[in-house]
Amino acid sequence: MEVFSDKEQIAHVIEGFKEQQLTIGFVPTMGALHKGHLALVEKALENNNKVVVSVFVNPTQFNNVDDLKKYPRTLEKDVLLLETVSKDILIFAPSVDDIYEGNTVSQHFNFDGLEHEMEGKFREGHFDGVGTVVKRLFEIVKPDNAYFGEKDFQQLQIIKKLVSKYFIPVNVIGCKIHRETNGLAMSSRNTRLTENQKKQAPFIYKTLKSAKKFFGTKSANWISKWVDTQFINNEVLKLEYFIIADINSLKQISRKTKNTKYRAFIAVYAGDIRLIDNIALN
């Protein structure tokens, strides 16, 4: 298990792999790893000769300074966890200066409107930050395949758009959401939940499953109003948004059309901890 903090060093090692015509799989993370991350790593190991995992808490995608400060940083634990999967993984854990070269600002992107939906409405500049760091990581690692979880489905679609618009030669692969036994989508933020919040949080996925059940017979507007009522009297969980959207445009719909794929998306606060989730509806 090798841990690199210098981008030039890891780029040199990867260049050697490329000369041997070895394929590179890449799993970008912000650390505080869990079983969902490990599933991405296992998928990458199955399909590539070499795998790189980045551990980098990217400051430009946080619009809340407190959230950035409180985000868990557990590199030593992350390394030990990755070793349980394979000792033949390269870990890239750069500093902010190594990625941003002393100018910690985002590049501005046009993702054809995807960046203005859902998360983009509530987290100004978030996807400029995501696009900036992912583009730079792709330039350093030069992966053949990159793996992202579908819990951040909007992010996944935006990264696919980034690769397409900037002609980046990488295959972006979305992987299914990993959940706790109680249904809660695995997230690094879950470690910050209190015991009471942990007990209440599975209600998020329960609500999504009910929305999927209703989707066969009820309108999108009816389902959205029903979800709103489920959270009105919840003293622990506060709904930020629930929408049903076309998976390609990510635009909220009011009525369904044939031959279109939809997902339900939700964002909920448990105290100051923000949790997101989604589910395929058809």
Image (cartoon, rainbow, N blue to C red):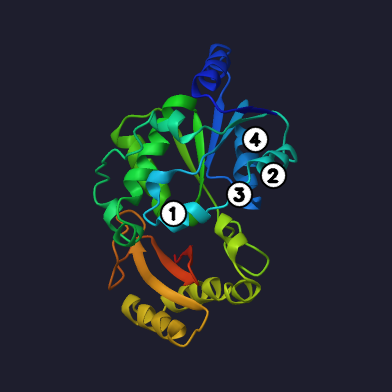
Please state which amino acid type lies under the numbered disc 3.
Ala
Q: Does 161 appear above or below 14? A: below
Which numbered tag is attached to residue 153?
1
Nearest to the observer: residue 174 or residue 204: 204
Q: Local crowd at mark 1 within 10 Å, few (<14), some, or many (≥20)?
A: many
- Between tags 1 and 2, which lies in front? 2
| Gap between marks 3 and 4 measured at Cα | 23 Å
**Image position, residue 62 (x, y; %):** 40, 51
Please state which amino acid type lies under the numbered disc 2.
Lys
Which numbered tag is attached to residue 46?
4
- Drawn side of residue 109 relative to residue 178, left or right: left
**Image position, residue 117 (x, y; %):** 30, 59
Q: Local crowd at mark 2 within 10 Å, few (<14), some, or many (≥20)?
A: few
Under tag 3, what secondary structure?
Answer: loop
| Gap between marks 3 and 2 measured at Cα | 8 Å
- Between tags 2 and 4, which lies in front? 2
